[in-house]
Amino acid sequence: MNRALTIAIDGPAASGKSTLGAALAERLGYTYFDSGVVYRALTWLALERGVDVRDEMELVRLAESARIEVVRPTAGDGRQYTVLVDGQDATWSLRTPAVDHNVSVVAAHPGVRRAMTEWLRQIAGGGAMVMVGRDIGTVVLPGADLKVYLTATGEERARRRYREQLERSLQAEYDQILAEMRRRDELDSGRAIAPLRPAPDAIILDSDHLTVDEEIDQVLQHLALSEVATR
Ligand code: CDP
């Protein structure tokens, strides 16, 4: 692979985007960026500061003033990266039930999306990037060299989130996780701007029936084909 490509991976909650994205980036020597982090960081900050998650103007103001940084892991506690919000380590705070519950409301505001999309495009500007999210292939990077849409059944995704919570020694209830995930998927798929959906030219991978290695193989095969096509 000679060119510095850009790869977009989208899909619903816990469909395996971050596992595939990080593994693929490592394999290719690319940067991995999880765009959900920016929406989660803004949501966390809004909750901390008492900003109403329905107040678009206040949220946009917060987004413009906040310093959100994603850096290499600063602790060996299973994190893929460290997220600093105004200099404070917020990495695990972004995964709390309160953030899960409010993030899709924050992310549906057009003004919030405008600010974040602009920022995400700057981050991906140099190429050699694997970016994961909901609208990366459709809106943020419509010119990406390869677009992947990852699916899995709601039950399988809820099982994964349940196991992740237990591994982090958190209390977890499967039914509650499944219900919360369905609610978030509906909000993300039903919003007017940048709804969750596959780009027309995305390859669809069903992570229920594939191992991560099989997913990587499929992606690499598609990349090799598109390299030949553009040579
Ligand atoms: O990890 P999980 O798949 O549960 O969620 P995430 O990728 O961290 O994204 C959290 C939320 O941010 C999503 O439910 C969306 O509401 C929002 N999001 C978005 O609107 N656009 C993106 N590109 C990424 C995330």
Image: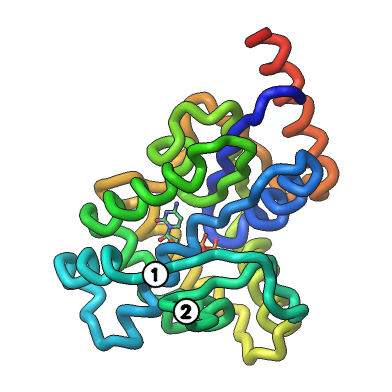
Residue beneath the point at 76% across and 25% down: 1
Q: From the viewer's perspective, is residue 130 above or below residue 230?
A: below
Q: Is 106 left, or right, of 153 in this rendering?
A: left
Residue beneath the point at 47% across and 73% down: 180
Q: Is 222 left, or right, of 6 in this rendering?
A: right
Q: Is label 1 within 8 A of ligand 1 (CB to nearest ligand atom)? A: no
The residue that label 2 is drawn on is 87
Residue beneath the point at 38% across and 56% down: 188
Q: Amino acid at mark 2?
A: Gly
Helix, strand or loop under label 1: loop
Q: Position of residue 172 (x, y in %)?
A: 62, 86
Say if mark 1 contacts mark 2, CB within 8 Å. yes
Q: From the viewer's perspective, is residue 119 above or below residue 149?
A: below
Q: Amino acid at mark 1?
A: Arg
The residue that label 1 is drawn on is 67
Helix, strand or loop under label 2: loop
